[in-house]
Amino acid sequence: MWPSIKEIIFPESLDHAVTLIENGAEFFAGGTYLVADRDSSIHTLIDINKLISNDITVSYGGVEIGAGADLQKFIDTAVSVNPDCRLIKAAKWSCSSKNIRNQRTMGGEIAKRRINSEVMVFLLVVNADLTIFTDKEKTISIRDWNGKGIITKISYYPARLESVEIQRYSVIPSAPAVVIAAGVRKGNMLTFTVGGKAIDFSRFVLPIKKYEENRLENFATKAAGNFFNDHYGSVDYKRHLIYTALKRMKEKL
Amino acid sequence: MTVSFTLNGKSTTVDVPLGRSLFDFLRGSGIFSVKFGSDKGEAGCDTVLINGRAFNASLVLMHSVAGKEVETLESLVEDGKLHPLQQSFLDAGAMQSGYTAPGMIMSIIALLRENPYPTEEDIRDALAGNLDRETGYVKPVQAVMDYLASRCIELVEMKNTNKNSC
């Protein structure tokens, strides 16, 4: 039971939905995060399930995902086109429970902006485009999104990237990751994004020509600055994990 | 709010408070195969099928099931006879206390509907959301494999019987 809920609204359009958002009101799609948290300051749910698409188009050229598509639907669709798609791996890692993947939407995964979400780290490193509805629809980079509006579509274009890799370290495979690192090679540039049990994401760009091993070490040290000592290990231990991940990805990219 | 849906094959219309979870509703309606797992609803012992897919009932609000078909373990029993998959769990000793078994069985039922010939990896993936320390998953996976094997034997026997009768 979520006793603080006093109203559930089913808006007729996205235009209508955005006018309803206020303090104590939240957009509701899959709802796994919201219902699990049962935040008592939320009194109104704005159910947008019927307003956002769950269509998915996957090809080697481009991936377009309706924000209402759940993680499992994405996996099932993508695996038949390209079983090596790294986002499949990220979606599975991001939530090991198939039951929850059946419910958790791709849009919700981004809206939550969970730092230890493999999906988020992946979409950040490939610089996915988000189609956002505020008063009208516009497309922006995921890196520029300020959290306002309703995500309606997520797209990225593997054909524009030479290669993508993602690595993660967790206590056991089904547990949330302690460190997640993803890397992409585009032209002569390598871009890395690091997330995990941290306070923020880190991003580094490295021209391949200027590659030296100590630069990866410097990146790892800077990224480790977002981590903290906890029962998973010290910051230094995590710095080592980040460095290992970056080095392994650099070899594969 | 009033919610109409199908529960274990029966049309159901109920008046529920806003914010009520499907888990609370089912337990309150005497459907006790659905168990409490955690405050976050992540343990999977509350697994039910909604339109044939597995969900954790604690994470589903009642308004979300309007117009949908909800199935619990109770729907598997016919004339007091266990479903062969339930029997397989019993035969393989995959029950332990039995607390998580209903959720596991429902997760496997959902898997078998989308993929009648799953691999061990598929089975383990389907069970990954059913947290269970008692069985260590060894016997539940074995129970599912035994069930699949027995179904194959049945199919072969059926085929042979038909051949003889022709």
Image (cartoon, coloured by chain):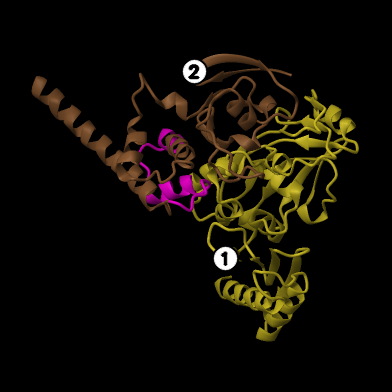
Chain colours: A yellow, B brown
Q: Which residue is mark 2?
A: B9
The numbered mark 1 sits on a residue in which chain? A
How many residues crowd around disc 1 within 10 Å: few (fewer than 14), some, or many (20 or more)? few
Q: Position of residue A253 (x, y in %)?
A: 58, 70
Q: In the rendered view of the protein, which quadrant contains the N terminus of chain B?
A: top right
**For this view, does A239 lie left or right of residue B27?**
right
Q: Position of residue B76 (x, y in %)?
A: 41, 26
Q: Which residue is mark 1?
A: A171
In the picture shown, does residue A147 fall above or below A53? below
Of A127 and A43, which appears nearest the observer? A43
Looking at the rendering, the stretch of residues picked out in magenta corresponds to: B110-134
Q: Alpha carbon of mark 2 to alpha carbon of mark 1: how far?
A: 42 Å
**Magenta-drawn stretch contains B96:** no
In the picture shown, does residue A39 fall above or below B159? below
Q: At 52% from the left edge and 15% from the top edge, which residue is drawn? A: B10
Indicate the quadrant where residue A116 lies: bottom right
Indicate the quadrant where residue A103 lies: top right
Q: At 68% from the left edge and 72% from the top edge, which residue is drawn? A: A188
Of A128 and B102, which appears nearest the observer? B102
